[in-house]
Image (cartoon, rainbow, N blue to C red):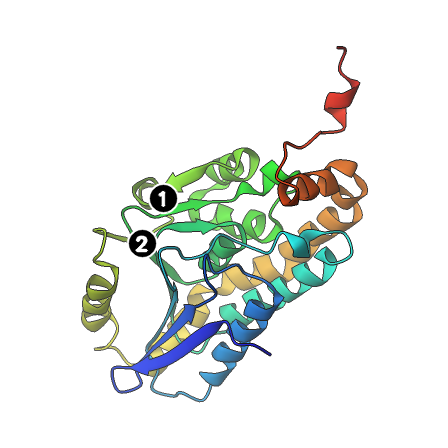
Amino acid sequence: MEKSVRLELTQQGQIARITLSAPKANILDKAMMLSLGAALEELVAQANLKAIVLAGAGSHFSFGASIEEHLPDRIGDTLAHLRKLLLKMALASAPLIAALRGQCLGGGFELALACDLIVAEESAQLGLPEIKLGVFPPAGAALLPMRVGSGRAAEMVLTGASWTANRAAAAGLINKVFPNGELEPQLDAWLAAEFLPRSAPALRFAAQAARLPVVRALEVDLPALERLYLNQLMEQPDAVEGVLAFLEKRQPRWSADQLLPA
């Protein structure tokens, strides 16, 4: 399996950094999901680990999931792999912190939502654009309401609009916003002040305690949303049309629109 993430340990092995590394926009395909899951498994034996930082190489965190893997013959497998990965993240051996710059969209945003904390540069943009493809984001719909409330979550899911880092912070979605170009040094300083002085076992079990609602959402709500997606939405022609239109670089032709009078 080709690795599409990098794993490194710093601060005498107390901070782990996992970097999505698949130019040019760190697309979250099946290979990356498997690679990220393997990196998390490697950290299970690190008893002195105090934080895991998840970041993206280059100018963007992630443009999101692979559009090709949303075609009818592949989407079931794609959703199953993503749910397995998100559950693995919810059982991570230390607090998991998403560090964002640039675009954080779709499946990439769902990765960030599965983290304990989110930090970002001011210019970061977060969004769930799946509605523009004629579908919706099951994991985003399961996890986002816990962070921003049902009304604001509905806005993101229904409109596909992106939020700036500052708007996301005001809504309680982002924990820290750093100046552009200062993500790594300011995050390192924050980790040194708030995590390195703490007990590694205490941080691990505190993270498990704080994740209980996330685990419930992934184990109960997400399977129900996947059934809605696979058994009902995918029966609609628009779910395929939106994906094909994106791949063919054209405007989608929605089924109901074809019935409107000329």
Closer to the chain start, of discs 1 and 2, is 2
Position of 29 compared to 53: left or right?
right
Which residue shows up at 74% across the image and 52% down it?
227
Position of 219 compared to 167: left or right?
right
Which residue shows up at 77% across the image and 11% down it?
261
User: Residue 252 or 49: which is nearer the viewer?
Assistant: 252
Q: Is residue 65 above or below residue 35?
A: above
Q: Quadrant of the C terminus?
A: top right
Q: Is residue 183 above or below residue 132?
A: below
Q: Quadrant of residue 131?
A: top right
Work out how far the residue at label 1 is from the one at label 2, CA to CA, in angstroms. 10 Å
Q: Residues within 10 Å of mark 1 (few under 14, many from 20)?
A: many
Residue 184 image offset from top left, x and y in percent: 25, 64
Q: Which residue is mark 2?
A: 120
Q: Which residue is mark 1?
A: 168
Position of 71 compared to 111: left or right?
right
Secondary structure state at the residue bearing disc 1? helix
Which residue shows up at 30% across the image and 46% down it?
123
User: Residue 109 or 20: which is nearer the viewer?
Assistant: 20
Callout 1–callout 2 Cβ contact below 8 Å: yes
Q: Amino acid at mark 1?
A: Ala
Which residue shows up at 22% across the image and 69% down it?
188
